[in-house]
Amino acid sequence: MSAYLWKVTTKKQVRKLPAGASVEIIKNNTTGKPTQQEINLAYNAKYGVDGGSLSTSYYDIQLCK
């Protein structure tokens, strides 16, 4: 079982999230990027703010090594 750590950062202001706000998301058994739902849950848990249903193009999504 492999776990992968993703760092997601806002490229510009997304609703109430300032540019540069970041979260880390752990995904198990897949190298696929986090989904919009996973990103929203992570931002809501860390900042108490929902990113809405915006495209993942509003975020810089990087696999941490």
Image (cartoon, rainbow, N blue to C red):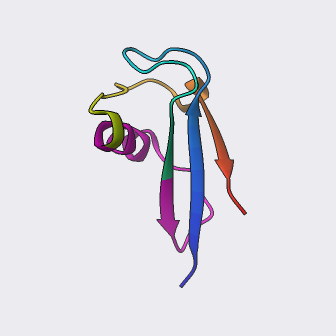
Residue that appears at 51% across and 26% down:
55
Residue that appears at 53% across and 85% down:
1
User: Residue 34 lies in magenta, yes or no?
Assistant: yes
* 28 sits left or right of 15 in the view: right
Query: Which sits in the foreground, 35 or 24?
Result: 24
* Total numbered circles: 0
Image coords of residue 28 (percent x, y): 49, 71
Image coords of residue 16 (percent x, y): 37, 16
Query: Which sits in the foreground, 21 or 57?
Result: 21
Image coords of residue 53 (percent x, y): 37, 26
* 38 sits left or right of 10 in the view: left
**Outermost bottom residue:** 1
User: Residue 21 lies in magenta, yes or no?
Assistant: no
Query: Which sits in the foreground, 47 or 41?
Result: 47
* 1 sits left or right of 39 in the view: right
* 4 sits left or right of 24 in the view: right
Residue 53 versus residue 34 in the image, above or below: above
Residue that appears at 54% across and 32% down:
56
Task: Locate the C terminus and report the quarter of the image it occupies.
Answer: bottom right
**Outermost left residue:** 48
Magenta stretch in the rendered image? 25-45
